[in-house]
Amino acid sequence: MKKILNISKLFILLLLIFTSTFSFAQKIKDLTNIYGVRDNQLIGYGLVVGLNGTGDIVSQIPFTENSLKNILNKLGVEVSKNKNLQLRNVASVIVTTELPLFSEIGEKIDVRVSSIGNCKSLEGGTLILTPLRGIDNKIYVIAQGKIIIEKIDNKKSFLTSNLNKVYNSGKILNGGNIEKIVQNNFYKNDTINLQLKNENFILAKQISDEINKHYPNTSVPINSKKITIFNNKKIKQNIVEVISNIQNINIKIPIEPEIFINQTNGIILTNKIIKIKPCTINYKNLCINLQENIKITKKKIQSKQIIINSNIYLEEMLKTLKSFKIETKEIIEILKILKISKCLSAKIEILS
């Protein structure tokens, strides 16, 4: 990280943490997903009971009352269909979770509970036995348990945040019991398919070439998003070990130059040293001449135009502009002109 202007130590630290993810090398597991290896989303409808007068107004939410009557009848409690239940301790909810691919029957997973009626709060409530189904309408998980209301972090700015409780949804930790597993086909026909998280022909070939260095003649880039790895008979390792080794292969990724500008306080940062192609641009009453190893000068001509000579390194140009009291909003416009003119090859990120 290159520091351009004088800024606070705290802001430098935060930006260093933020831009440290732009590394020179990333592992294949960070760039791709294994085709067929994914969680499966499940959904179910249920009732939450035990609320302290904050449940659905059943006269306004009839399906809550009907659901409760059906459950009570199944439990041997006779409730007349014509009788109106005046309850405020019950709420209708949608229950969701994600079934991990390699899970086993009997394992427990967290589930999320969300109100669909007009209850004020699910706090203190208990979800009663609820089947969760997949897209095939088969039951994979049975959920039940005490609901925990979470604090949600609502970010207000880069430096501050605010924690608020959301009362109409919550979690049940280990509230789902796995009853059925999903069969996977990620290793179908003795092949493994990698899917790039971002479409890129060059990166697909680069990854395939690196895999072939470790396991010769096994990898082929199919298109900009897919790489197929064949089980070469020469590979004497367990397939899990092979996948683990492949996922840990480092791929060198060129860092894209980026400029971060806080237009409120004038802070300007980059993630690397940036050079600008020699050029001359005009902006308002400024004529900026950028050349290699040029001496920094400033002069006025008769038309009241200011001519500024500066070096082609972005840092030097910014220092020169700042020394002549050029404001941040004008610097942003100058950088945009340089980018449009193809003199500057960098992404410009404006922070408010």
Image (spheres, rainbow, N blue to C red):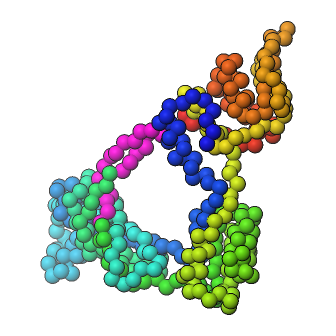
In the depicted view, which residue is nearer to us: 137 or 225?
A: 225
Asked if residue 242 lies left or right of residue 178, the reply is right
Q: Is residue 183 left or right of residue 169?
A: right
Q: Is residue 33 visible?
A: no
Q: Is residue 277 left or right of residue 246?
A: right
User: Extreme bottom residue here?
Assistant: 233
Q: Locate residue 222, reporting x and y percent.
A: 74, 74
Compare residues 42 and 75 and report the one nearer the observer. 42
Res. 162 image quadrant: top left
| Total numbered circles | 0
Q: Is residue 351 above or below residue 207?
A: above
**Where does the C terminus fall, quadrant-wise?**
top right
Q: Is residue 245 left or right of residue 82?
A: right
Nearest the eye: 349 or 99: 349
Please tell me in which quadrant of the rendered image residue 50 appears: bottom left
Residue at 75%, 34% (x, y): give it. Answer: 313
Residue sitting at x 39%, y 69%: 97
- Which region is colored magenta? 152-172
Q: Nearer the viewer, residue 145 or 221?
A: 221
Image coordinates of residue 21 in percent, x first then y, are 57, 52
Magenta stretch secondary structure, dominant: strand
Q: Quadrant of residue 228?
A: bottom right
Q: Residue furthest top?
A: 302
User: What residue is shown at x 23% (from left), y 66% (from top)?
Assistant: 146
Q: Can residue 84 be seen in the rendering of this structure?
A: yes
